[in-house]
Image (cartoon, rainbow, N blue to C red):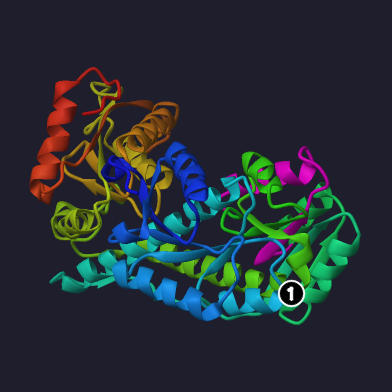
Amino acid sequence: MQDKNSAFSIARIAYVGGDKEALEALASAFADAGYSLVSHEDAQKADIGLIDLRGKQLSSKKAQAVAGQLRKSSPDSSILILIDPYIDATARKALRRHGELVTILTKPEGLIERCRQILRLRNIAEETGERLKSLATLSRLNEFPPIAAPSTPLRVLIAGEAGPTALAAINALKPISEQCVCVFSAGQALRAIENSKFDCAVFLPTRENDPLMSLARALRRHPKHASMPIIFPLPDPDDMAVFVERGASDFILTDHVAADLAPKVQLATRRTRLLKSMRRFLNSCVGEGVRDAASGAFTTNFLTEHGSRICARADQTDHQLSMIVLRLYSSAKGSGEPEPGRRALHQAARLINRVTRAEDLVARIANDTFLVLAPATNEAEATKTALRIQGVIENTVFRSADDELLYGIEVDIAACTRPQGLCIEESVAFALATLREYPSGQVQSS
């Protein structure tokens, strides 16, 4: 089976191993999330491979063979193995060598959320590799921090009511963690997080509206704690669908805590540390001809070099590449300053880097015009990002150098998807043409 609209989906998911009913159920759920589910025969250029072993006699060798075939068809894809909740610990340990395990019964929301997290990590990793190549080929001096995940001992927070699950979590994490802090309420967990630094957290909510769920959502929005993985032990795999809507993203069955929590925490923290290192690299690339000193955006020279790689990567992987054009206007023009509004424009430009993602490329293509390249992003998501940038800048008050004059910044924005096959120069021209067609300041799509 292959979705005819797969070229317009966010990602391609290759599926193998399940029966026709399971395939149709998953295909419908993934389509609603914007992903296309294809059979293993069409696994080329797939972003994720799903191996469905539910209701089947498990064989580690068979799983290894299937995973090898998927990786051969699409070397860049990650492997997820779908299992039943009653699989014993020995079989789970053997299967973990070939892919990440996801327990699922009838509701796939937890699986879709896990795929979303994997794609997020993949996008950042791809941009890190491509940007490193671009920096290495520049004939100018540049600086960037090393990409490495530190191997310091783990500090884990366990929050929730005392009981068998909490005790099992403590015993499972004790051999791998330097310190395991246990608290009983969301308030105590918040105080612990504010006063100490944790690599991972295990929340034990007792109901859907448990205050721990509100704390989890708040932490995901906090710039300091957003990257901390939070694992939710649940008694039933179908409960994942309910907790995903409440902001949870990583789960484990309570019956699997004793055997699987430790390796899951180690994997999650290792990924998080590597993700932080890659984000630090993406945000710290500086040097002659790399970033504009005034606005902090990348220069046109770097855009030409790196944009060519991004466009080529998008064509090779069939991923969409969206573009956002922003033109800034200072309402302080004519106020009598030698250069009216220039400082305000620079301050507003720096806000663009803060609002966009780490893997997005923000380049200055004119004195007051900026281009944002958003890899693996469709036009609808790019439009939302453009509106968010416009709202942040236009609702911020900027000051002059002597802090006497206040400035307001207006933003004209346009979002579009790069047509396949265009080079970076043609793509920039296409984005600017989209902005010129709608000069009213309202966000428009091509």
Residue 114, position as x, y percentages in the image:
54, 55
Position of residue 353 relative to residue 71, above or below, is: above
Q: Quadrant of the C terminus?
A: top left
What segment is highlighted magenta in the picture?
A: 196-223
Residue 362, position as x, y percentages in the image:
28, 48
In the image, what residue type sits under mark 1? Ala
Q: Farthest residue to the right: give it.
A: 163
Q: Identify which residue, 418 or 254, lies in the foreground.
A: 254
Question: Does residue 283 appear in the picture of this structure?
Answer: no
Q: 161 left or right of 439? A: right
Q: Which residue is mark 1?
A: 259
Residue at 51% x, 43% y is 25
Q: 242 left or right of 7? A: right
Q: Identify which residue, 445 or 346, lies in the foreground.
A: 445
Q: Is residue 446 magenta?
A: no
Q: Quadrant of residue 217?
A: top right
Dot 1: few (<14), some (14–19), or many (≥20) neighbours within 10 Å?
Answer: some
Q: 50 left or right of 101? A: left
Q: Quadrant of residue 200?
A: bottom right
Residue at 71% x, 80% y is 176
Position of residue 223 relative to residue 144, above or below, is: above
